[in-house]
Amino acid sequence: MDADQDARLIALSPLDGRYAGKLDALRGHFSEFALVRNRVRVELAWLVALSDEPAIRELPPFPADARRAIGEALESFSLTDAARVKVIEARTNHDVKAVEYWLKERFAAVAAVARGAEFIHFACTSEDINNLAYALALRDARRDVLLPALQGLVQDLEELAHRHAGLAMLARTHGQAATPTTLGKEIANVCARLDRATAALGRVPIKGKANGAVGNYNAHVVAYPEVDWERLAAKMVAGLGLEFNPYTTQIEPHDGIAEYCDALARANTVLIDLDRDLWGYISLGYFRQRMKEGEVGSSTMPHKVNPIDFENSEGNLGVANALLRYLAGKLPVSRWQRDLTDSTVLRNLGVAIGHSLLGWAALKQGLAKVEADPSRVAADLDANWEVLAEAIQTVMRRYGLPEPYEQLKALTRGRTGISATALREFIGGLALPDNAKTRLLTLTPATYVGLAAELARRI
């Protein structure tokens, strides 16, 4: 057995065990390696910003060869480099300080940088580095992984909605037979909701700060009172592609991360709703699942093809939302100017996002397997002609017939299996204009779908 398989068998988290192969896209953003790499990126961005500030004469602007060396250090940052940082951390017992010491090692042979080595981490608190490192992870994961995955689901749902736009289906409200819809329109409802949730996630601002121990540039101003530190910090943060937050304590208050988690949880909630509905439609026989050669549905019942993809999706999205809601509620709360509870909690961002991604992948896999069964859908409609009671009583209201609701209630309430013949006999006895009566007499549960097909095709 290979080493990777061995590691997965003894992993504590299923994200790094059973599901490890499905989450490779996230490792570049939320692994320990990725966090260390982002810290290096932030430290070097701050160092370059300081060197470009004319008032800081002790750190002249870096020449071209030094800038190339800095760029190469970022580009080539490897697992070996991260491992060396961890060795230093074992000695210092401080993860951010270990990055500072590694940078001094790394650039010892680059004269222009080595001369200014004490400007690495100059006037910074660890949170100046960490808040920006996590912000970069959230931004890049959203751009590279999360939004493309959600947009892919939206596209899959659009295609399903268009394919079944006109397939009439019995609706169910309170679990009971209700006014018909189309299968495509029900999928379009979810598509519209998910599209909105995806856009909301994309709009969440991702903020960062670089203002020292309690957010006031205290040490900065003492060392260089002539520097416009707020302008310099804002320029550096913007240069990383983040939004500058000028008002913080020691920590960036994480309101943006809370919004991010909430937006992600809302998208997951839409998909949990879809998972449950699809599970139900499979149970009703509206959807069949394509079988995979060699796959087992039940360990004891050979006939079964279980809706495991939608169940797996629902379970993972539930775990994700439990974490996301906790993160959103906890992270913006910190005692006075800072406590350390956010530090260990932030390390679970990747866990919450990992379970989200697993849920989306399972749902996408399930959608690829389902096929509508038009005959089963049609049979359900044909067994429930009583759903036309709404249409009949509404037309009766238009033409002023007495007690239309009450008449249809007496005829249909609590009764299933009312025949087409019985309804048509009732319609035939109504004092309606000929065109209205004809329209009702030709109506069937399958044609009583209003604008459902048009709405589904428009999504």
Image (cartoon, grey):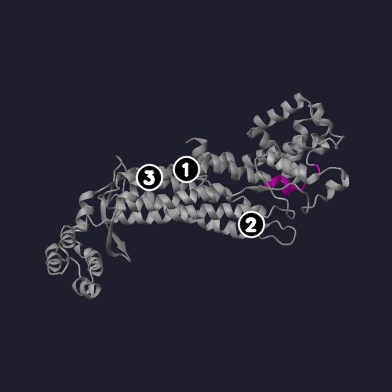
The tag earlier along the polypeptide, 2 or 3, is 3
Question: Residue at (43%, 45%) from the top-left corner?
Answer: 361
Measuring 20% from the left and 50% from the top, which residue is drawn there?
Answer: 375
Q: In which quarter of the image is residue 73?
A: top right
- In space, the residues marked 2 and 1 are separated at their CA atoms by 26 Å
The residue that label 2 is drawn on is 331
Q: In this view, does 363 lie to the left or right of 72?
A: left
Q: Return the residue at label 1.
A: 149
Q: Earlier in the sequence, mark 2 or mark 1?
A: 1
Viewer-nearest of discs 1 and 3: 3
- Provide residue 228's location: percent of width, then percent of height: 81, 44
- Three-letter code for the amino acid on which mark 1 is drawn: Ala
Residue type at the position of mark 2: Leu
Nearest to the observer: residue 154 or residue 37: 154
User: SS for tag 1?
Assistant: helix
Sequence-wise, the earlier of marks 1 and 3 is: 1
Query: Of all residues shown, which one is farthest toward the top?
Result: 65
3D distance between C-alphas at marks 2 and 3? 36 Å
Residue 366 highlighted magenta (yes or no): no
- The magenta stretch is 122-131
Q: Do the residues labelled 2 and 3 touch (CB within 8 Å)?
A: no
**Disc nearest the viewer among 2 and 3:** 3
**Residue 439 point in image, percent of width and height:** 18, 59
Cα distance in 3D space between marks 1 and 3 = 14 Å
Specify the principal SS of the magenta part. Answer: helix
For this rendering, which residue is in front, 57 or 87? 57
Mark number for residue 158? 3
Against 445, residue 151 (above or below) is above
- Front one among 253 and 11: 253
Q: Which amino acid does label 3 sit on?
A: Glu
Taking the image as drawn, is residue 46 in sight? yes
